[in-house]
Image: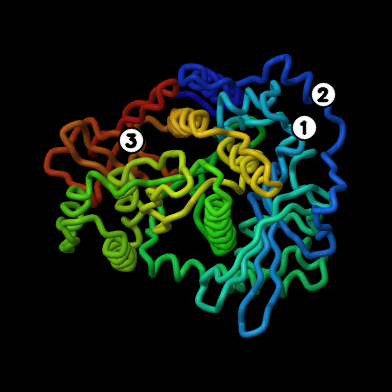
Amino acid sequence: MSRPSAQNRKQLQAIARRVMTERGLQPDFSAAAKAEADAITKPAADSSASIKDLSALLWASIDNDDSRDLDQLSVAEPLAGGAVKILVAVADVDATVRRDSAIDLHARTNTTSVYTAAEIFPMLPEKLSTDLTSLGEGQKRLAIVVEMVVGRDGAVNDSAVFRAVVLNRAKLAYNSVAAWLDGTAPSPPRLAAVRGLDELLRLQDRVAQAMKNRRHQQGALSLETIQTRALFNGDVLADLLPDEKNRAKELIEDFMIAANGVTAKYLESKGVPSLRRILRTPERWDRIVALAATLGERLPAEAHAGALEGFLIKRQRADALRFPDLALSVVKLLGSGEYAIQRPGQTPDGHFGLAVRDYTHSTAPNRRFPDLITQRQLKSALTGRPAVYGDAELDGLARHCTTQEDAAAKVERQVRKSAAALLLASRIGERFDALVTGAAEKGTWVRIVRPSVEGRLVRGFDGLDVGDHVQVELVHVDVERGFIDFARS
């Protein structure tokens, strides 16, 4: 029986690098990209009269505890009649990363940062993404600002887009902010240290909740699946913990969805082609209907986001324990999102899962190349210059970004599975309570609760169906391939 090893992280890093290369992703920057990064010694500056100085506002970031690649800040201002002005500042990465530079070519190749259990493979050199192009606390930075006037009902009634200088007053973390908003913990020290920020953050929370309610009334889907994050003790893998949604994450999510919608509409209004993020009407709707029927529910024969959302809400209330697995099944049947060119005047495909017509990716240019593309298109629209990317190039980039994002997701999933196998390697023969999460001709799958790990049931699966509770014994793991095998006990 093997013991936890200080080589855990190195083993997972090696797996990540191997799988990245197999999937057509570059784990390392070229010598030219490194040289370019070394030559950049300070953040970008611009004294143009059109750039507003908004550094006096109480901007703050909310992200993961350990995040340093901070892409966005937000701030709120109460208006008459219960309306609120929400401002979202997005790091002006384009001001530092020039198109067709060696750094840009690396970003264009991978199209995204890859977040594996053992190592982050950033899209941009860390010197930039975690410092010179990051909206770090206490640092003045150039930004693209999306301004939205939001009514009591959560509707964006007016909007504007412009360039500005901003200053992050507090680097906050999701979990501590969520606990404070829920009333289960005191104000985080960095929040308490900025006078007046607590009041503005509660105002942002109120607006975000109204936005979320409005989106779901319009058919946005409640799809909360189980995701895990690796917990290391030094270089030894200690646990896999569920990474759950909370109120602070929802706040940022709803502001980003709204800002992405405003950006898409702005580009359309200026006659500039854009790269949209779309989720088409599901081709496998009939299977979603059949899945609902097994739970005693009826869905219409034609795809309808509102009806599906009603079904999901009902099932979440009825069976919260099994809901993440139901949500995962629905996610798989909905299919993957993709990037597509949106030409001015063309009817957009929209995003079925978010129930929005106009949607792009624009709020994470340190982490995603589509957002950097959008930022460049946006800056050309703001100045009236010709679009940086034409139709033919955007069309090719849409396909490439879709392919590479899918590849990155597969790398992350593979390393999570390998991490789970590694964590369980010393526990062969142990028994666990499990839930059946998949049952088909190709195999039966079960999930154990602690650690939250899914594996294949290789013996004793006859008669089992999704949702059944069983006791299983761990019989085999393969760390390199991420295989975990159980037998019914």
Residue wearing tag 3: 455
Split into 4 quadrants, where in the image is the N terminus? top left
How far apart marks 2 and 1 lie (CA) works out to 8 Å
Q: Residue at x 27, y 38 (%)?
A: 445
Task: Tell me where residue 28 appears, x and y as whole percent.
Answer: 64, 20
352 over 463 or under it: above or below: below
Query: Residue 297 location, x and y as percent?
Result: 18, 63
- Residue under label 2, please give it: 38
Q: Which of disc 3 and disc 2 is earlier in sequence?
A: 2
In this picture, is 476 found above or below 284?
above
Contact flag, marks 2 and 3 (Cβ < 8 Å): no
Q: Nearer the viewer, residue 156 or 117?
A: 156
**Which is more N-terminal, label 1 or label 2?**
2
Label at residue 127: 1
> Which amino acid type is shown beneath numbered disc 3?
Gly
Inspect this view and state whether residue 423 appears.
Answer: no
